[in-house]
Amino acid sequence: MTVRTAPEPVVVDELITETADRLFGELCTHEAVQAAEDNGGAPDIWEAFCETGFDLIAVPEAAGGSGGTLAEAIEVLRLVGYHSAPIPAAENGILGGWLLAEAGLQRPDGLVTVVPPRVGSGLRMASDGRSASTGSSAGDGTAACKTDAGTGSCTIEIDNDGSARLSGTAERVPWARSAEAIVCICEYDGTSMVVSVPASECTITPLPNMAGEPRDTVSFDGATARAAPAPDGVDADALAQRGALSRVALMAGAIEKMCQLTVSYTNERVQFGRPVARFQAVQQHLVWAAQDAALVRMAAEIAAREATRGDAPFEIAAAKLVANQAAARATKACHQAHGAMGMTQEYPLHHFSRRLWSWRKEYGADAHWSAVLGEMATGVGAEGLYPLITSGTAALA
Amino acid sequence: MRFTPTELTGPELDLQAEVREFLASELPPGTHEPCLGMAADHDREFSAKMAARGWVGMALPSRWGGSDRTAVQRFIVVEEMLRWGAPVGHHWVADRQTGNVILKFGTDEQRERFLPPICRGELGFSIGMSEPDSGSDLASVSTRAERADDGWVVNGTKIWTSNAHMNDWFICLLRTAPMEDGNKHAGLSQFLIDLQSPGLEISPIPFLDGSHHFNEVTFHDVFVPDINVVGQPGMGWHQNTTEMAYERGGPDRWLSPFSTVEQLLREAAGTPMEDAVSGLFGELAARWWGIRNLSLSVARLIDEGEAPSVESALVKEMGTRYEQEVVEKLVQLIDEEYSPESESLFERLLAQCVVTFPGNTIRGGTIEILRSVASKGLEGLPA
């Protein structure tokens, strides 16, 4: 009989969980998170975060990072979501920081953000309300090519010495207004290139997402930048997957906290002479939210585990789709259970629900990931469907 | 509440491969009509074949005929059987719960008498909980067992008794003392009753599609010897609650429509598939992946000595609703009307899902009762 072996376990140091939980627990009070929204950022929280080294977790030490595994970075992001910490932890670390390190580009002193690649082909509107151009991600072999940059489109020219010039706009770039460098990835002459643009070269127009987090419009206007080819496996698809994984982690934390708020509130709020949590109709909301919290956390942890080991296209796609759907259900259940109180700014539920509504749409909405998963499922065929569910990406080989 | 991710070990992956090989050779696709989850055909021969592999009562101790296997190993066997639509009906209840109850609360004599034949796949059990006036409020059961020489005399009626007409034994919750004010859980006891006992009458309650699963079981002065009392008289409620925990959270609560989905994919192969159809397969795979990992983590917790009753209730409530959602999505997708006697296996299975799956969120504790169980456990969540 063949003896199979299980892969090496992926372990996250408990100290990481404890440290991040304590840090955010102290700093990300309801008032502080509200203030960050009003002010468009929270430099003090970001600074304290950087002091722990978590800002560059999973970026190799050789590239100036803090080291650690992707799974550990994902655990930190889960806690960012759990505390609604108003900081660009994913953009600076496992997204932008990762791209710079992979391409061997210099990291600036200060915050790095990343232009989200185009994910999916659904209908989009530009932020000014006009239908956005779709752009093209294929290099045309000439000196200049048009590339996707968020929901906008821009043109890049790269010289042989790695200096580059960009024009056009990138939209919904997280925390661009606070960044030193804006990193993007594009196909250029058939090669994936990582491009790092100093923010000082760009015109940045603030725009909030539904949670009041910065998702700015960046006009390049001939900005000069540095470009370097990305190694194999680092391209727009890979960035889209990492970005999706980052959102799943944030969403897992937010749903869990939202669920805990709802359990507490419904056990304290008394109507008809008893806590409303005693009513079967309210219990339904609590149970459904708790299930979604458990489901998304499980999805995040397994996707992180597999992505730490190697490629995990199935797990990441499945996790993002599951998280998107769970966010829709859980926000509805938790708001309903809170009644009018949940609709106020003074009560913290909205820090989580509004973030979930935004994160749900970032790095791939439901239609995109179900299409990706659909190709995998129909590709393995009837006999392969259950093995895909039990073994994930390994069953695609 | 915490669901910790887990994954299969090397030996567990070996077992999974062994079960898949067994099924591919015993029930090659296209040669059998898949069953819809645990409402599976009763096939004593198939149960005996599984038992010969050590896959019935596998988590019971070898001293009593079991294989000393774990909850996770049982999970692996069960999920493969269910997703394949295998005819596991005959040994299902004994394997899932009655064996455990007898091991936990029974006497050595009962263990010797029941567990080895359960592990050989020989004994089919029915469960006697519901009565005409006792459904979700199970503590109100009124079928009485009264003291007699060397035993008890039972009178009353149990209903919704699945497969009593095919099974051998009946594990029953009966009232042995009147209901007390302020302690409605007292005075209940569990009994093992031979379904061939004189005075025991089994009459069918046809299922909505005319099929025969449910029965009414009436006791007319049925004598049950003392040696068939399980555990302590009066402790029936506690034992029954323990038993129900074994019912919850396993693959039988989320896999029932799998063979239907798989068959759609099989029948659709080779024809161009619309994006919505292809995307649905992707979505279903993702949801099953998530729920399976929650359910697997519950089995691992059991092996670690935990009693994950809240987690089990959450998985069962979610899983059974998901089963219905899967069917609804298929229904929305298919243009034609489908018949239970269609030439297409997929259409036959889908018709059967539509008609029988409303019961999935009722059997073994309604989702409303599960919500009460689970939400009480959520109160301890740190905020």
Image (tube, grey):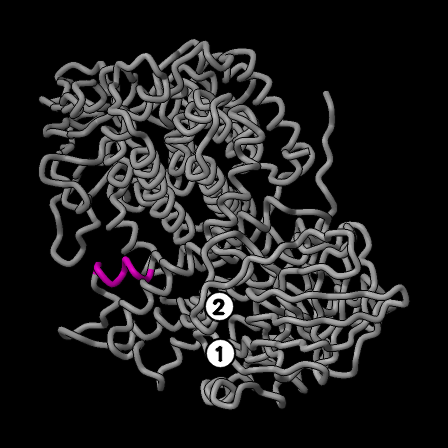
Q: Is residue B63 visible?
A: no
Q: Is residue A187 above or below residue A95?
A: above
Residue A3, quarter of picture: top right
Nearest the viewer among A230 and B168 is: A230
Q: Mark 1 or 2 closer to N-term? A: 2
In the rendered structure, which segment of residues is drawn in magenta?
A280-286
Q: Dot 1: few (<14), some (14–19), or many (≥20) neighbours within 10 Å?
A: some
What residue do we see at 57% from left, 73% from top? A80
> Is residue A273 located in the magenta-colored stretch of the structure?
no
Q: Residue at x 29, y 29 (%)?
A: B335
Q: Residue at x 48, y 68 (%)?
A: A126
- Marks 1, 2 in one chain: yes
| Mark seen at residue B296 | none
Question: Seen in the image, is A355 located left or right of residue B39?
Answer: right
Question: Is-magenta flag for residue A285?
Answer: yes
Amino acid identity at mark 2: Ala
Q: How many marks?
A: 2
Identify the mark at residue A126; answer none if there is no mark: 2
Badge 1 element: loop
Q: Hey, what amino acid is under mark 1?
A: Pro
Residue A208's disc is 1
Q: Position of residue A277 (x, y in %)?
A: 26, 67
